Amino acid sequence: MSIYALAAELGKAIKADERMIRMEKAKEAYEKSEKINNLLMEYGIQQQALTTMGDSADIDTDALARIQDRIDEIYAMITTDPLFVELDAAQNDVNELMETVNNTIMFNATGKTPCTHDCSTCGGCH
């Protein structure tokens, strides 16, 4: 079997993995959420307003502070929403899966375990 055929099989196995399926479902729910989409739209509008006001010769610091406060509030609402929290957790699990798969490939290709920058995973650098 060629290296490309093996890579295709690996890709199919990753796509069928429960972590990838979970992430795809979480992403779809997040993207379809009217609440999230409205918050993201307002976030973009507020960011644009902040930029526009910041570029103005007559800067109203109180108005800038109110806009920044609203941006912070929207950001908090997005990042604490259960759909975002689930998507973030699912994405982290997929990232961990991909790192493990890549490390396994590198070990088998080179005979060396890639440095994870986590000293608990090996006997030391160099």
Image: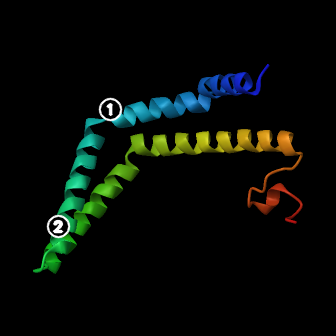
> Tag on residue 72?
none
Measured as percent of width and height from the top left, residue 15 is found at 59, 26
Q: Amino acid at mark 1?
A: Lys
Front in this rendered view, residue 110 or 83 = 110
Counting residues from the start of the chain, the first of labels 2 and 1 encountered is 1
Front in this rendered view, residue 111 or 5 = 5
Q: Amino acid at mark 2?
A: Thr
Label 2 – label 1 distance at C-alpha: 30 Å
Assess whether mark 1 and mark 2 are in contact (beta carbons under 8 angstroms): no
> Tag on residue 52?
2
Where on the picture, by quarter, is residue 62? Answer: bottom left
Helix, strand or loop at mark 1: helix
Location of the C terminus by quadrant is bottom right
Measured as percent of width and height from the top left, residue 122 is found at 85, 57
Front in this rendered view, residue 125 or 63 = 125
- Horizontal relation, residue 24 to residue 58: left or right: right
Question: Which residue: 40% across, 31% down?
Answer: 28
Depicted 109 relative to depicted 124: above or below: above
Dot 1, how many residues are within 10 Å of its Cα: few (below 14), some (14-19), or many (20+)? few
Question: Which residue: 14% across, 79% down?
Answer: 59
Depicted 47 relative to depicted 29: above or below: below
Helix, strand or loop at mark 2: helix
> Tag on residue 32?
1
- Horizontal relation, residue 11 to residue 80: left or right: right
Dot 2, how many residues are within 10 Å of its Cα: few (below 14), some (14-19), or many (20+)? few
Question: Which residue: 79% across, 40% down?
Answer: 104
Numbered circles on residues, count: 2
Mark 2 vs mark 1, foreground winner is 2
Measured as percent of width and height from the top left, residue 93 is found at 60, 41
Where on the picture, by quarter, is residue 1? Answer: top right
- Horizontal relation, residue 109 to residue 23: left or right: right
